[in-house]
Image (cartoon, helix red, strand yellow):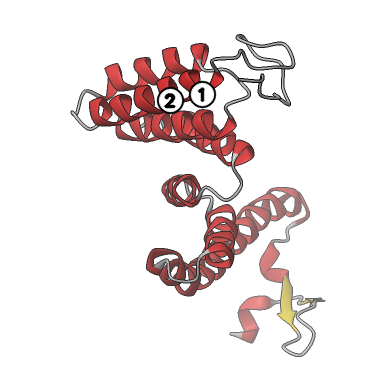
Amino acid sequence: MAAATCNQTCRYCDGELPVNSRQLVLHWRLAISLLTVAGQSGDYIEAESSYSRALQMCPSCFQKDRSILFSNRAAARMKQDKKEMAISDCSKAIQLNPSYIRALLRRAELYEKTDKLDEALEDYKSILEKDPSIHQAREACMRLPKQIEERNERLKEEMLGKLKDLGNLVLRPFGLSTENFQIKQDSSTGSYSINFVQNPNNNR
């Protein structure tokens, strides 16, 4: 059997897979299946270690296999609350296999759990583009825009509160406060105007 071409240099090949490449592929398919079953046992620490060892040995030219290993290790890390590490693994899996919906779903869930709602929405949109039948992604695309809007409003209020505190600190030596400055928003343009008020208490 002729050697199979490999697009990447890896531990077991330098431009080409060995003549028994088919057996090697079958070996890794079986190994990944066994690892997946082992990962469902509930011992997530051992599962993470097993996937890490497999990634060290799996030829880099086996991109689909490595994407599965990264995604499965992400699941094991997710169960251990290692969210950022799990996100990193999902990203590596997606980089190797951009159409890997399970890895995209997993990363979207992790983004939500870490309050990265914009990133989560982008992943859910990407999933729907690939498979419109995914109910979880469709539901998230309807739910997240409102959550993002509410979060942005909350952050804006927090920012204005901090600016008000800072303004009072600066104005206090001059006998003024932010109450002397009325901020009004133009509903048509969204822009703000500031008016000075000499005696704000008299205007209440």
Q: Give the class, few, some or many, for how many residues have Cα within 10 Å of label 2's Cα (few <14, many ≥20).
A: few
Tell me the CA gap for discs 2 and 1: 6 Å
Q: Amino acid at mark 2?
A: Leu
Q: Is residue 12 above or below residue 190?
A: above
**Residue 29: quadrant of the picture:** top left
Q: Foreground: 40 or 201?
A: 40
Q: Foreground: 93 or 136?
A: 93
Q: Foreground: 77 or 96?
A: 96
Q: Foreground: 116 or 102?
A: 102
At horizontal 63% and vertical 83% (from top left) the residue drawn is 202
Label pair 2/1, CB-CB below 8 angstroms: yes
Q: Is residue 34 above or below residue 49?
A: below
Residue 157: mark in rendering? none
Horizontal placement of 54 versus 2: left or right? left
Q: Give the class, few, some or many, for how many residues have Cα within 10 Å of label 1's Cα (few <14, many ≥20).
A: few
| Number of residue marks | 2
The N terminus appears in which quarter of the rendering? top right
Horizontal placement of 184 versus 78: left or right? right
At horizontal 68% and vertical 50% (from top left) the residue drawn is 166
Q: Which residue is mark 1?
A: 22
Q: Which residue is mark 2?
A: 26
- Helix, strand or loop at label 1? It is helix
Q: Amino acid at mark 1?
A: Arg
The C terminus appears in which quarter of the rendering? bottom right
